[in-house]
Amino acid sequence: MEVLYEGLGQLIGWHDPDENREYVLHNKSRELKDKTMTANQAVGKFIKDGDFIASGGFGHVRVSMNIIYEILRQQKRNLIMAGKTAVHDLDILVGNGCVDRVEVAYSFGHEIRGLSPASRRMVESGKCRVVAETSNAGYQWRFLAGMLGIPFLPSRNLMGTDTAKYSSCKVVKDPFSGKLINLIPAAYPDVAFIHVHRCDIYGNCQIDGILVEDFELARCARKLIITTEQIISSDVIRTEPWKTVIPFYFVDGVVEQRYGSHPCEMHGEYFFDEEHIAEWLDLSKTDDGVKKYSGKYIYGVEDFGEYIELCGGEKKMFFLKERQAMRVSLITPWRK
Amino acid sequence: MSYIPAIECNVREFIAFTGAGMLENGKSVFVGTGLPMIAGILAQKTHAPNLLIIFEAGGVGPILPELPISVGQSLTCHRGVAASSMHDVMASCQAGFIDYGFLGGAQIDMYGNINTTCIGDHNLPKVRLPGSGGANDIASFANKTIIIAASQSKRTFVNKLDFLTSPGYLDGPGAREKAGLPLSTGPYRVITQLATYGFDENTKQMKLISLHPGVSLEEVQDNCSFDMLIPEKYTISPEPSEKDLHILRKEIDPTGIMIGK
């Protein structure tokens, strides 16, 4: 197939499929073993400076915030992040200088709450670079191609636009239909971290609600950290195996962290902490404010449990559960 | 020209009502955060109870009791038919199951191409915007795309986009097909605070369909950098009823997050 045109974007996280098989052969254990560890241990063991990282969930929904904060605490640097509708997680990491390159589907915004002052400032001042553009489906299908163990996936989006021009895709003539077709390169993030509702000590995971991209992301990531609201017995997993969306052999580490998605939402559990998000959006308007936020909520605490206490503890979480059940009204403190 | 509206409503309420009116019962619509969601819910609560609402993160067929503030929120599958995944809904979209898709943008041109990526140079932008998100996918795949631009002006209706994020008719007739995009797709309507537009069948350029009540032709042209096609026949956009506004204000967005702004 002749390449008719190709994007100028940097190709991030691509490997030859045989090279990846080799990686899987030597690094992804099929042994059923206890993988439980702390967030501190997981980040220390699996994430290194310069890695290409991807965070599970979507926007402010089911995000592994305990890993995000731990990345900051351990001062990881020069990370590349998948902007696969990455919102609060990416804003915190870019704003604090941990991530300096992003491949963007959707980034630097907080949906209805407005744009992200901190990460926008980093991009507009050249401290963080957008290395490639794509779309949500475009990113999703990078993970799907990775999961399938194939070099690329053909698709019919992106073509004809500047998004394609700045992407890492290539356009060819489809040998079947004779029409142009876009080739989306596979992605194998160095590390992914996904927050789930429950899993066992081996990493067999159940997720309630939408999966977003996590089915595919879990299967293409080279290293996968699972954080979970709750560790449950393997017997429960084996009683209802059809509920397992990520089986253990994709998982490298398991971290139990109740409320681990806060201030983001957890399906059926707790709502967005709009007060906390509003505080970040307000403080992150200046570099000093970013430092103040991180000093208070991240560097000022030992771990995620202490952070939750600082955010209002069980009383706050009770309110967020009531809001999730729509028994109390929505509050929108970020509205001016 | 003096105009006395039948019922007082603000621009955002008018746009949401206009968007809702374009959606048909028994069809599917892909919605994003904000006014598109409101339009979808209003349609569902009025003339299109069996409108299939789909969210890009995986919520399928919800019955929405209140306005979600994120396209991934639990509410997006509230009493839905499926809590699915992005791959599932994007694949359905690519395969042709989505009738309508809503888009918004910082800049739009005469062919309905949209910029949501940056203002200024891409490498060191004056303003960095969030990027495509699902917009390029919706613009590529949906059978009919409806663009909402709540602040039409010379700055937003431009001759040349700073960045073409999502495809309209690209540079004119036949361009989408030539680029490889699915046949019979593309922008269908554009709704702004001033008017509703469509696209000329032959030239694929934006064309006035109806002026919102009280808006003049001059206002449309004064708030557009390119030459808007003005046909001999155009109409006045229909207005929401008291019942529509009651649903918008009391049921869909009681805290006024979107329509109260």
Image: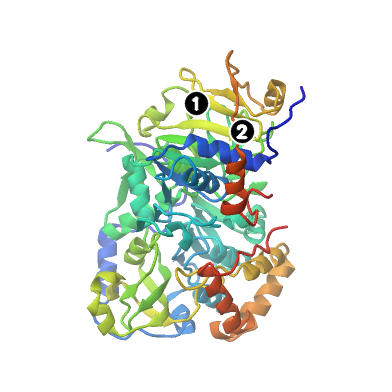
Q: Is tag 2's residue or tag 1's residue first in the polypeptide sequence?
A: 1
Residue B154 found in image quarter: top right
Quadrant of the drawing holding the N terminus of chain A: top left
Q: Is residue B195 visible?
A: yes
A108 or B87, which is in the foreground? B87
Residue B239, numbered label: 2
Which of the pair A138/A184 is nearer the observer? A138
User: Quick one: quadrant of the C terminus of chain A?
Assistant: bottom right
Figure coloring: rainbow
The number of callouts visible is 2
- Residue hosting label 1: B171
B190 versus A8 height, above or below: above
Percent x, y of residue B155: 68, 34
Image coordinates for residue B100, horizontal then vertical, percent: 43, 39
- Where on the picture, by quarter, is residue A158? top left
Of the residues shown, which amino acid type is indicated by label 2?
Glu
